[in-house]
Image (cartoon, grey):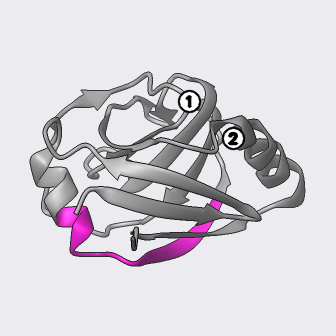
Amino acid sequence: MTDLVITAGPYRFDARLETELAPKTCAAFAKALPFQSQVVHVRWSGEAIWIPLGDRDFGIGLENHTSFPAPGQIIIYPGGISETEILLAYGGVHFASKVGQLAGNHFITLTSGLENLPALGTLTLWKGAQDIRIEQAVF
């Protein structure tokens, strides 16, 4: 299973798990599917939305990690000096927290709907938390 459907606010995106680049992260996250939560706008990182997960432990370390995800890339920070979180970039991002720069595992890439990312970011910034659901695609 590598194909996903992500519904965030009123938008739908197709996506793929990056199983070759982040196999441990993808395997751990696949066990949590379908994944439902809410996204809020980031505080320090730039143009992104995020899912704060507190002390949730996916049992992963760093792999395929970056501090600069591109629009349409989803990263997960496995916890440590800051809380566990998932971040979806919709524009320029320098991933950080109140303790400084962080790096997260790039494990999902959007494959359609990228044109709606800025609107989702703006909606989340000005209207608040939006529901998100990540699930396996059914063909």
Q: Which mark is residue 71?
A: 1
Q: Residue at x 58, y 54 (%)?
A: 13
Q: Position of residue 56 (x, y in %)?
A: 31, 69
* Residue type, numbered disc 2: Leu
The outermost residue toward the right is 126
**Is 32 colored magenta in this rendering?**
yes
The vertical placement of 32 against 21, above or below, is below
The vertical placement of 129 against 78, above or below, is below
The local crowd at label 2, few if under 14, some if 14 to 19, many if 20 or more residues have their Cα within 10 Å, is many
The vertical placement of 85 against 73, above or below, is below
| Discs 2, 1 touching: Cβ within 8 Å | yes
Q: Does residue 25 appear left or right of residue 124 in this picture?
A: left
Quarter the N terminus occupies: bottom left
Question: The residue tagged with tag 2: helix, strand or loop?
Answer: helix
Q: Does residue 78 appear left or right of residue 76 in this picture?
A: left
Quarter the C terminus occupies: bottom left
Q: How many marks?
A: 2
The outermost residue toward the front is 139
Nearer to the camera, 129 or 115: 115
Residue 101 seen in render: yes
Q: Position of residue 81 (x, y in %)?
A: 30, 44
Residue 57 seen in render: no
Query: Which of pointers 2 and 1 lies earlier in the amino acid sequence?
Result: 1
Q: Which mark is residue 117?
A: 2
Question: The residue tagged with tag 1: helix, strand or loop?
Answer: loop
The local crowd at label 1, few if under 14, some if 14 to 19, many if 20 or more residues have their Cα within 10 Å, is some
Q: Position of residue 105 (x, y in %)?
A: 28, 39
* Residue type, numbered disc 1: Pro
Highlighted magenta segment, given as a residue range:
28-39
Q: Residue at x 37, y 31 (%)?
A: 102
Q: CA distance from mark 2 to mark 1?
A: 8 Å
Q: Residue at x 56, y 51 (%)?
A: 50
